Image (spheres, helix red, strand yellow):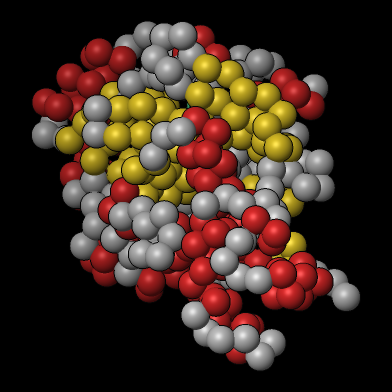
Amino acid sequence: MNRSDIKSMLPDELEAALVEMGEPRFRAGQIFTWLMRGVTDFSSMTNIGKSLQMKLDERYYITSPEILRKQVSEEDGTIKYLWKLMDGSAVESVLMHYKHGSTVCVSSQVGCRMGCAFCASAQGGWVRNLSSSEILDQVLFTEKDSGTRVSNIVMMGIGEPLDNFDNVIRFIELVTHPDGINIGMRHISLSTCGLPEKIDKLGDYNLQLTLSLSLHAPDDETRLGLMPVNRRYPTQEVLDACTRYYEKTGRRISIEYALIDGVNDSNEQAEMLARIALSLCAHINLIPLNNVDGSPLRPSRRLKQFVSLLKEKGANVTVRRRLGGDIEAACGQLRKKASG
Ligand code: SAH
């Protein structure tokens, strides 16, 4: 019998499966609790009895990643994990400590097919989607290994979350479930390169999470040079989808903009960006570009001027603080090093 992935099941699905196996409903809650604690085999579920443990083991498997590499920043305690998944694929996550709590940045795919020019994850192409349990494991096993209680999640690791829509939604349902680790929906951010149909679909769920749009350029010409996805979905279509999203959910969009030397950092582009942000009621998060091996793109030298101009135009802007600089904690670089 082909075993299925038990940790990707929601409690009500677990319940239905147990009832079908002739077991009492309440077992589902017990099993779910064990899974959310990161147990790696059914025999650790000490309150459910040997025979049920064995029945479960015949029908299901429990995903568990191994730590392939772990780096701890001496500067700020940021921890970067490279996980080996059960099929040998590797993905990474990063644990960052802030005053308001700890954030884990998770990957949603093995590789990525979006091909952004500045992004290390794009370089090896796309391998496969992660299951909901594999995304969740990055949170569970980061908590387990580091002894830290995670309070915030950002989907800004490897992959395009909206390109793995169903598994990502299910991951969100699992991680926010009150009987599990119960992360607040408002403590989750989902970052996308901008897929309008999927943004609309996400809007229909009306979740109170934060949607971040990786805009990186205010005009089609510049954006096309950086993000091939713009060929399929021109900037205005993406922005229109974001407007609809904001209207539906009442949640402000966050615009991510990595400042690149001589590419997207002119005064004119700052003015265009400010106009876009104001019309969307969006917040702008400027990211100092991280250098990526093999890419000629360099961080902008005009960060200060760019920020002042945005502020002058009335835009709401912050500059992302760089954490884990000494361990290259950014943007798919560890996975790339391990495989190359
Ligand atoms: N696919 C999603 C999420 C993953 S990337 C997305 O495109 O949003 C998370 C963020 O890091 C995105 O804003 C992405 O554009 C940005 N990023 C990728 N490479 C970067 C680099 N070298 N320097 C700065 N930001 C980068």
Quadrant in the picture for the C terminus: top right
Residue 62 appears at what percent x and percent y?
Answer: 69, 58
Viewport quadrant of the N terminus = bottom right
Where is residue 52? Give x, y as percent.
Answer: 70, 75
User: In the rendered image, is residue 12 in sight?
Assistant: no
In the depicted structure, whether residue 330 falls above or below residue 256: above
The structure residue drawn at horizontal position 52% and vertical position 84%, both measured from the top left corner, is 25
Figure disc tally? 0
Percent coordinates x, y for residue 311 in the rendering: 14, 27
Q: Residue at x 66, y 15 (%)?
A: 293
Counting from the top left corner in percent of width and height, residue 75 is at 41, 9
Q: Nearer the viewer, residue 64 or 273?
A: 64
Is 85 in front, or is 213?
85
**Image quadrant assignment for residue 84:** top right
Q: Is residue 304 visible?
A: yes
Residue closer to the observer: 329 or 216: 329
Q: Quadrant of residue 122?
A: top right
Q: Is residue 88 left or right of residue 7?
A: right
Find the residue positioned furthest to the right. 1
Residue located 24% across and 14% down the image: 305
Q: Is residue 110 above or below residue 83?
A: below
User: Would residue 77 appear left or right of 48 to someone viewing this image?
Assistant: left
Residue 46 falls left or right of residue 298: right
Q: Is residue 39 left or right of residue 11?
A: right
Residue drawn at x 24%, y 27% is 99
